Image (spheres, helix red, strand yellow):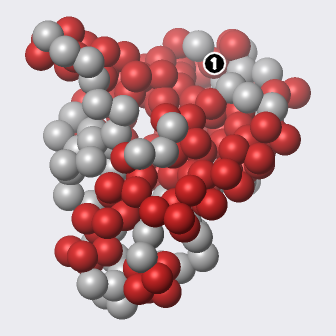
Amino acid sequence: MDPDEDLLVRAVREPAAFEPLVDRHSAALHGYLVRRAPTAADDLLSEVWLQAYATRHTYDIARGPARGWLFGVARNVLARHWQAVSRAAGGPRPPYESTVGDPWQAVDQRLDAAAVGTELRSALAVLPDQERELLLLVAWEQLTPTEAAAVVGIPAGTARSRLHRARARLRDGLSDTTLTNLTGDFA
């Protein structure tokens, strides 16, 4: 199996080298999009792959792993989607769709999903956008802090400090019962 970075670099000269990236990363990217814009996730995923393919020549291996670059493309596509939704609605886009049902509720049967989900969404909604995005990229998308830093376009050290701050704020915003029920991903 070719490392993703090699495939992405090779895809500039050999377009067929891009195909394994789609196979490897579609599920993770789709999950990222579903958790942020569930009704548009399928269309947005298609747009992510179109944008990634069209801009594959801009990937710089020195800036981090291909996976982080792909999530960065997804984040940009999602931001454009939210801007379009905002323009169509005539108002500002919500920084986090806190009213969206949490698709992970069914994944973890150990939690009282309704109570914890509501409290967690509320605590996430008050985090600054960049801190929330870093936290969700690490907790939900299983990116490393360095990969998440590349996605949001900040240095890795800055991402680690903001991630630490986000976790502290989240802990402060959640009840002891919820903290006990959560795995180590958030808290």
Residue at the image point whose x is 37% and y is 16% from the top: 80
Residue 18 location, x and y as percent? 59, 31
For mark 1, what is the residue? 56
Residue at the left extreme, as displayed:
89
As displayed, is residue 29 above or below residue 111? above
Res 57 seen here: yes
Residue 54 location, x and y as percent? 53, 13
Residue 90 location, x and y as percent? 14, 10
In the image, 184 versus 170, the foreground residue is 170
At mark 1, the secondary structure is helix
* Label total for image: 1
Residue at the image point whose x is 63% and y is 60% from the top: 168
Res 18 seen here: no
Relative to 34, 15 lies left or right = right
Residue 60 location, x and y as percent? 79, 21
In the image, 131 versus 3, the foreground residue is 131
As displayed, is residue 52 above or below residue 105? above
Residue at the image point whose x is 69% and y is 13% from the top: 57
Relative to 60, 175 lies left or right = left
- Residue type pointed to by label 1: Arg
